[in-house]
Image (spheres, rainbow, N blue to C red):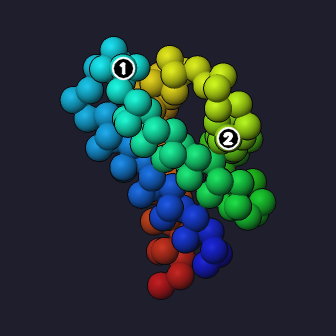
Amino acid sequence: MRKDRAYLKHIIEAASNIEKFIEGVYKEDFLANVEKQYAVLRGLEIIGEATKNLSEGLKSKHPQIPWKEIAGMRDKLIHQYFGVDLDLVWETVRMKLPEFKTQISEILKEIEANQT
């Protein structure tokens, strides 16, 4: 569980950074700003890598989270860089990331509450 806690914290930190990177940014601005794209893509890579390293026990306790889809996005970003769909990235970080971050925060709170 100690490793899971560390990975969950990495996920939350990366998600928070992505939120900062796109705060007040319109889609058109994101699509035109390579620095923001790189920053967001790196954050998604971190989230995906940390997700892949979470224990199967933790993931099986929370089947409502699409773990494979999240890890799969990381793989697509790493292995198909030139084929990255920035519209999909934008939709993901705007529409799905906030809820995912909330879910991960709740899991971390649950783990920390059980360890005290």
SS type, badge 2: helix
Instruction: Point out the tag, 1 or 2, that comes first from the N-terminus.
Output: 1
Q: Nearer the viewer, residue 92 or 31?
A: 31
Could you say where residue 77 lies in the image, as x and y percent from the top left? 64, 36
Q: Nearer the viewer, residue 19 or 109?
A: 19
Could you say where residue 87 lies in the image, as x and y percent from the top left? 50, 17
* 52 on left or right of 42: right
- Check the picture and name the quadrant holding the N terminus: bottom right
* 14 on left or right of 71: left
Q: Residues within 10 Å of mark 1 (few under 14, many from 20)?
A: few
Residue at (71% x, 31% y) in the render: 80
Q: From the viewer's perspective, is residue 10 above or below residue 29?
A: below
User: Which quarter of the picture shows residue 95?
Assistant: top left
Residue of label 2: 78
User: Which quarter of the picture shows residue 53?
Assistant: bottom right
- For badge 1, the amino acid type reads Ala
> Residue 32 shows which numbered tag?
1
Residue at (78% x, 60% y) in the render: 56
* 32 on left or right of 88: left
- For badge 2, the amino acid type reads Ile
Could you say where residue 48 lies in the image, as x and y percent from the top left? 63, 48
Residue 66 visible here: no
Q: Residue farthest to the bottom?
A: 116
C-alpha distance separating marks 1 and 2: 21 Å
Residue 29 visible here: yes
Q: Residue farthest to the left?
A: 24
User: Number of numbered discs present?
Assistant: 2
